[in-house]
Image (cartoon, helix red, strand yellow):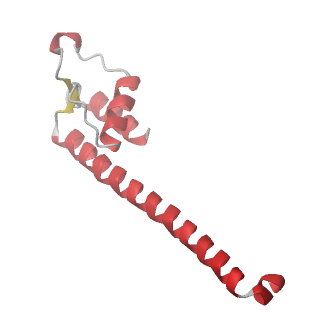
Amino acid sequence: MIAALGYQLLNNAYPGTVLEVVTDPESRGGHENFAEFVYFSLISLTSVGYGDMAPIGPAAKSIAIFQGIFGQLYLAMLIAKLVGTYTAQSMKEQDSIRNPVRRIFD
């Protein structure tokens, strides 16, 4: 949502420099609404890039690049956290099976 707001503020400051509709250029006309910026932001974050919209100016391209990198790093950190939590819980259970006396006092 923050990036979508950034796209919209950038577009308000410099009209027509944020998104280009690749599939149907006649439908654009400079009337971007916030939902289109949210849509573009989410596809940039997930690095899907359907190809129906593209950033035009260097500032919009920079935001899209940052979102793509951040989206991949966020996913990697989330998976690492889940694996680490599962591993720690599994090791704790294994330790309590091996040391039943410790299990009573924990």
Q: Is residue 7 left or right of residue 14?
A: right
* In the image, farthest residue toward the top: 26
Nearest the eye: 18 or 14? 18
* 43 up-or-down from 106: above or below: above
Where is residue 47? Give x, y as percent.
29, 43
Residue at 40 percent across and 25 percent down: it is: 34
| Image quadrant containing the N terminus | top left
Q: Is residue 11 left or right of residue 42?
A: left
* 89 up-or-down from 20: above or below: below
Where is residue 98? Give x, y as percent.
68, 86
* In the image, farthest residue toward the front: 98
Which quarter of the picture shows residue 25?
top left
Residue at 16 percent across and 42 percent down: it is: 58
| Image quadrant containing the C terminus | bottom right
Residue at 26 percent across and 43 percent down: it is: 64
Nearest the eye: 57 or 51? 51
Where is residue 36? Give x, y as percent.
35, 24
Which quarter of the picture shows residue 39?
top left
* In the image, farthest residue toward the right: 104
Nearest the eye: 4 or 47? 47
Nearest the eye: 47 or 96? 96
